[in-house]
Image (spheres, rainbow, N blue to C red):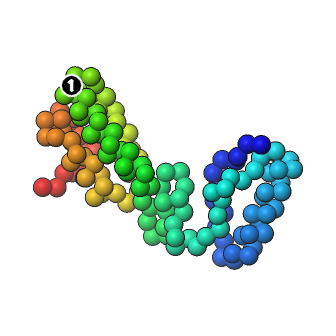
Amino acid sequence: MADTDDFVLLGKDKKKLHTIRQEIEIFLEDYLQLQLNNKTTVDNIWNGIDFCGYVTYPPYRKLRKSTKKKMKKKLKYLQKKYYEEEVTLEDIRASVNSYLGILKHCNSYNLTMSVIRKLDDHILEQLDLGDRLELKN
């Protein structure tokens, strides 16, 4: 049996959510030969919903911690490989633009700045991010 893709149910009554979860499990197994994975939980929304790479809380959304770490590690690696002439500026630009696209969907100004500041001035100047972000001094 395969696991289902991600989905989220929201409600005010925890007992009702557990009942709905059981009904979903039965439907998935009986009609689709699918099952919920072991990460399936019923929890308070104020603990955050980890979904599609973000953790969402009622007033805001943050990037998942593991994604932040991978992002910073990848930029450090790309910068090193750039100076070893194993990647091009275009490779770095593609990754930076991808990360900026991911970051624009969450409350991430400080994270965006810390990620961008991982790049040295020489590379930053060549990337010419211009209106994509405003760097604070």
Who's the residue at 27% across and 40% down the image?
Answer: 76
In the picture shown, does residue 117 fall above or below 84?
A: below
Q: Is 115 left, or right, of 21 in this rendering?
A: left
Q: Position of residue 84 (x, y in %)?
A: 21, 25
Q: Is 78 left, or right, of 6 in this rendering?
A: left
Residue 109 visible (yes or no): yes
Residue 97 visible (yes or no): no
Who's the residue at 52% across and 73% down the image?
Answer: 46
Give SS at disc 1. loop
Q: Position of residue 24 (x, y in %)?
A: 78, 58
The amino acid beneath tag 1 is: Glu
In the picture shown, does residue 123 fall above or below 109?
A: above
Who's the residue at 83% across and 54% down the image?
Answer: 27
Q: Position of residue 109 (x, y in %)?
A: 30, 57
- What residue sits right under mark 1 in the picture? 84
Q: Position of residue 93 (x, y in %)?
A: 29, 33
